Amino acid sequence: MIPPSLRLGDVIDDYCPRCKLLLNHAVASMVGGSVVKVVCQTCHSEHPYKNAEVPPKKKTGPKKALPDQALAKAAPAAASKAKAPVPEEAAEPPKKKRASSPARYISRHATRPPRGRV
Ligand SMILES: [Zn+2]
């Protein structure tokens, strides 16, 4: 089966290095019947034709570090959360803390109406 011959301006799929996606491209230049350069129909950037192949992702890049970053972000947050209640627990008995936290909210609202009256 003979592949359909391409002409300048024909829309073909190719990987856009700028959009980093497989998108529609217009044939910009051809040599000997093969596409050499294409223009992205999304960002209008011209780049060499990549045979519609998505390049392999770099596994050593930030993607591998992402879980580590998430862990690093979660660890300090957990550490800070764990550290913050410690002084409160040390100041108050653990049994009173649970009972006192909802009472604070009630007392806050109770203090508002007197403010407006006075
Ligand atoms: Zn593009």
Image: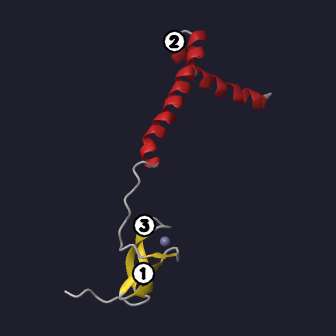
Frontmost residue, 11 versus 55: 55
Residue pictured at 51% horizontal, 17% vertical: 98
Disc nearer the start of the sequence (3/2): 3
Tag shown at residue 36: 1
Circle 1/circle 3 CB separation < 8 Å: no
Ligand 1 closer than 8 Å to label 3 CB: yes
> Picture coordinates of residue 89 (x, y %)?
56, 13
Residue pictured at 70% horizontal, 29% vertical: 112
Residue pictured at 42% horizontal, 48% vertical: 60
Residue pictured at 39% horizontal, 82% vertical: 35
- For disc 3, the marked residue is 21
> Picture coordinates of residue 42 (x, y %)?
49, 74
Mark 1 or mark 3: which is in front? 1
Identify residue type, mark 2. Answer: Pro
Identify residue type, mark 1. Answer: Val
> Up-down: is 7 above or below 46?
below
Q: Is mark 3 on a helix, strand or loop?
A: strand
- For disc 2, the marked residue is 94
Disc nearer the start of the sequence (2/1): 1
Q: How far apart are marks 3 and 2 (CA)?
A: 55 Å
Q: What element carries label 1?
A: strand
Identify residue type, mark 3. Answer: Leu
Mark 2 or mark 1: which is in front? 1
